Image (cartoon, rainbow, N blue to C red):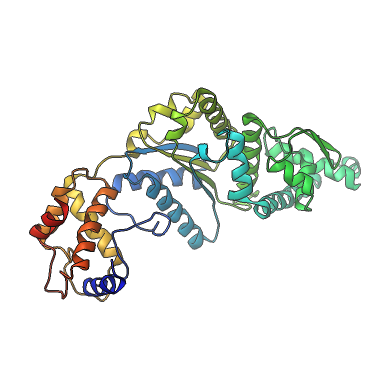
Amino acid sequence: MVQMELREFLEICGFREFPFEIKPIRHPEIWAGREKILKELKHFVTNVKVNGLCEFGIITGEKGSGKTHSLFHIRYIIEQDAKEEGIPALVGYIDNPCGLGPKKLFPEVYRYITSAVLGSEELKKIFANSIDLINQLAVKKSSSLPPGEQARIRTPKEWSEWCESIYKEIINKPLIPYKLMKSLTEGESKALDWITGMTKKSERIRGVTVQPLVSNILCAKALANIINLAVLRKTDGTPNLYSAAFLFVDQLEDIGTASPTVHRDQIVGWRTLIDEVQSYFGVLWAMTGSAEDISSYLTPAVDRRQTSNPEKLKLLPLEIDKVREFIIEIMKHFRKVDVKVPSIYPFSKDGLEEVITQTTERLPSHLLTSCRIVTTKAAEEDRISSVKDKIDRDMVLEYLT
């Protein structure tokens, strides 16, 4: 489409930008129709962020049904809530966990999360804030000890050991040594290489011998340790750093088509992670197909986390009475606020109905494609030269048949 023609079309219709080419990453704020799905997704977030649960859910649907957009939209809601509340949430998005490395195994997922989703500065912040809280708890607890016992924790070495004992009380069986946490905050490169999975053999760092994070179990436990630290609560119950942590994982269907080794390794890694995090954590998967394709491989421990019924997160084609509402809502989002045109414009009533009729699969992407084809061709041919012109049924049939 010539840019001049597009600009004229948008101006006549009163659109800020072209409404029928939505990319989830560009417009995550848009949600049209599917109120029940949105309610279920918000309930998922509330269970994690407010009720402190560890939740797991699977969004399913055919290609073009809006799975990726659902993940981006719920991330958008979490981030907007965080701005209003003044307390951030830790949110990560992974596009296809089988595409993060040549072996398609969970340690590659771990390296991606620690290096790209989090990064060294975020890791340092999580550890530094955790150490500060542990020190506060250590001071408070030591003040209640008898004088004789207090005297035994006066040297730096004894204080470090005392803080480590507090650390082990608040984090169940931590995989990351307390001394390593401290060295990470101080910029120790070997410690950073180890925590991001780059170390391939046993290392001795600051007097601590650590095994390389190369197995799915170790990587899952290390990631769980990081998340448990990120969502720690102060003694008054308020977040120390983050209100909650969420991981949104797209294109999980690739796991189902992978080799048995890859499939088993990925599932073991994910279910270990979900089972190891203690609270305030949500994992939301999105995949083409059926939830049963994946959930049959999960352990009862993970099934206990899955309080969101997969049937309630299934993105079916839009109901016929919701399709018109969906298209109008999309156009409304891109319409300038001061424009006085009918909500269905540039379509006539019979034109919009014909777009719906010609779109055999009532999935969001298919409906947007039909609208995009019709409106771009109408603009190219200068069929909309004033607000008196409309895209009617005959025009739609001409362009879509």
Residue 399: % across, % down: 16, 56
Residue 337: % across, % down: 28, 73
Query: How many numbered circles are shown?
Result: 0
Q: Quadrant of residue 312?
A: top left
Residue pictured at 73% horizontal, 44% vertical: 193
Residue 303: % across, % down: 46, 28
On the picture, is 66 further left or further right than 52?
left
- In the picture shown, does residue 158 fall above or below 122? above
Regarding residue 233, the answer to whether it shows in the image is no
Residue pictured at 17% horizontal, 66% vertical: 346
- In the picture shown, does residue 122 fall above or below 112? below
On the picture, is 264 further left or further right than 211?
left
Q: Quadrant of residue 147?
A: top right
Q: 115 and 312: which one is in front?
A: 115
Q: 214 and 134: which one is in front?
A: 214
Q: Quadrant of residue 391?
A: bottom left
Residue pictured at 54% horizontal, 52% vertical: 89
**Quadrant (top left/top right/bottom left/bottom right) for the N terminus:** bottom left
Regarding residue 262, the answer to whether it shows in the image is yes
Residue 120: % across, % down: 68, 52
